[in-house]
Amino acid sequence: MGFTLRDHTADVAVEADGESLGGVFAAVADGLTAAMCDDPAETGDRFSFSVRAEGREALLFDYLDQLIYERDVRGVLPAAHEATVRRAGDEWVVEASARGVPFADVDARDVKAVTYSEMRLAETDAGWEAYVVFDV
Amino acid sequence: METREFGDIELRRVREHVWEIPQEGEMNAPARVLASEALLDHIGDDKTLEQLRNATHLPGIANHAICMPDGHQGYGFPVGGVGATDTTDGCISPGAVGYDINCGVRMMTTNLTYEDLRGHEEELVDALFEAVPSGLGGGGVVKGDAETIEDILARGMRWAVDAGYATDDDLAHCEDEGFRDDARPEFVSQKAKDRGRNQIGSLGSGNHFLEVQRVTDIYRDDVAESFGLEADQIVVLIHCGSRGLGHQTCTDYLRRIEKEHKDLLDDLPDKELAAAPAGSELAEEYYGAMCAAINFAWVNRQLIMHRTREVFADVFDRDWRDMEMRLLYDVAHNIAKKEVHEVGVDPEGRPVRDGDAVEREERELYVHRKGATRAFPAGRPELPPAYADVGQPVIIPGSMGAGSYVLRGGDQSLDLTFGSTAHGAGRLMSRTKAKQEYWGETVQDELREQEKIYVKAQSGATVAEEAPGVYKDVDEVVRVSDELGIGDKVARTFPVCNIKG
């Protein structure tokens, strides 16, 4: 269970799997971190947030978008992701946390945005798998 | 008829460098690829053609969806794609603009020669790297409060003039004089403004860069003279966009379209083509927000140019005005604009493919250019007075080991491409593969020792990902543009110093 960075002509793709929906969300987020930094430092404090959306794919999109937003406004590289996903009536909710590594401690580069392009989120015999392309 | 097949897509040769995917099924128009055989081999190698065919599904698309010679796979709409949609019964697509709204390039000329600069390369690249924020979390030239952000979004480069970062002459040499009157800052989300406030005047990373270059070749003396270019001259090229503010604006509107216009989205083959129907509230709000982000990007590049002038003044111990550091032109290559073009229409007046048209008439269109540069020939009313009689300057950045080009809008561009041409060399190799093939420090050492190009970057991985070998042959891209008459070769430049994130 984890992630792999996949080839994409101009951008970067993350393929990930997890035993639960929360697990695969966190694994994609770890892939996003890897796309920005080869070796994140072990520094920084954890922060938490939650996101709600109308469906599972939309929730994955909004979760990753929120991480990019938190990165820019907190001035940290989010790393070591944890996530729990649940259904709440008509919506889906992710309760998430990450360690915010200060930019001063890492050699990192920008990822502009999450995209829906070729996005896949599917249940498998072993849990869940996902494929997400990020704009670099 | 000569044809080429790539997977399930068949292209028919229309004429030299022009290939067509015929209209069929749910396509609303044919698609065209402008490429030589060699470039077509690259274009057919990934999902570019599939994405181009998908783009023809956009409602109200006029004439053709078009792929420029440097086209490659993007997300939803291909990079190097041009699609014009009717502003009355068509749509506007954030996905066909891209996340980096008004990503673009500007070139500044100087009166320095390469000989003047020799011996200063290391000092210059270090000073530029120090002065121009780059990379992730590098901050900006200006730290903006809420009022500053609003002002920049509303007034673009006019804000920069009032704040002392730009001159009236800079405005006169920028696309739309650095200001979109249609900007509506109130339709840019607080999230986007939050992301932008720490990044006003910053390069970012990826393929964005600032490069000091020398002019090596002049192809059209009269046009070069009008552009203020001559052989051996030092120029500066700046390539970046609207940073987190633009990226967030695109993201916000993609999600709103998903929620508010699901019926239209369900008819499109790719969610990233997300489009709002022309005339809808959402279309108007996106256009206003996008224009505000366009203003932000022009200010971003202006602040970087301002810092560059200060650095040159320090290094050469002269006022930048004495070095005649003038903006040649600033032009976007990720944008949608309302423009009037001639299109074929059916008996009901709807834009249709040429073969079905009963007449041609001028229509207002949203011209989406995603990784494509506006390339208007002389005579278009949008051109600034300085270039009204010669044609619009088009700046084509190459890789950090190859040359860049200055073109001018070609006479054929209005007929073939809604007044557009390429935007760069076009990527060939993925970032993940590039990091396996190249090592950043080695690339830097080789460029310095073999080519006398001084590169400085926040991240060694960025240098590997942007190594010259990951790009297509920019000479071939420009050759096709020139031979098609959509963008005419004027001058070629070669890197001297390059900084990136």
Image: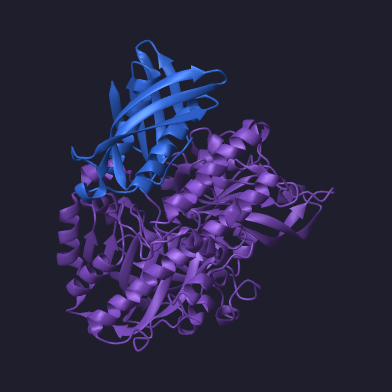
Chain colours: A blue, B purple
Q: Quadrant of residue B114?
A: bottom left
Specify whether B368 is left or right of B353.
left
Q: Is residue B144 left or right of residue B189?
A: left
Residue appearing at x 28%, y 49% in the figure = B465
Is residue B401 or residue B295 the one in the foreground? B295
Which quarter of the figure is the C terminus of chain B placed in? bottom left
Residue drawn where x is 43% and y is 50% of the image: B195
Residue B126 location in percent, x, y?
20, 68
Q: Residue at x 44, y 83 (%)?
A: B228
Residue lying furthest bottom: B322
Report which quarter residue A64 is drawn in: top left
Residue A45 visible from this viewpoint: yes
Q: Single out the residue that lies furthest toward the right.
A: B347
Q: Who is closer to the viewer here, B438 or B196? A: B196
> Relative to the observer, which residue lies in front, A23 or B95?
A23
Residue B475 in the image: above or below residue A114: below
Percent x, y of residue B355: 73, 49
- Identity of the residue drawn at 43% across and 70% down: B302
The spot of residue B265 in percent (x, y) is 62, 34
Counting labels gives 0
Q: Is residue B409 visible?
A: no
- Where does the image place residue A123, in percent across and percent down from the top left? 43, 15
Left/right placement of residue B199 relative to residue A42 reads right
In this view, the residue in front, B223 or B3, is B223
- The image quadrant where one finds the N terminus of chain B is top right
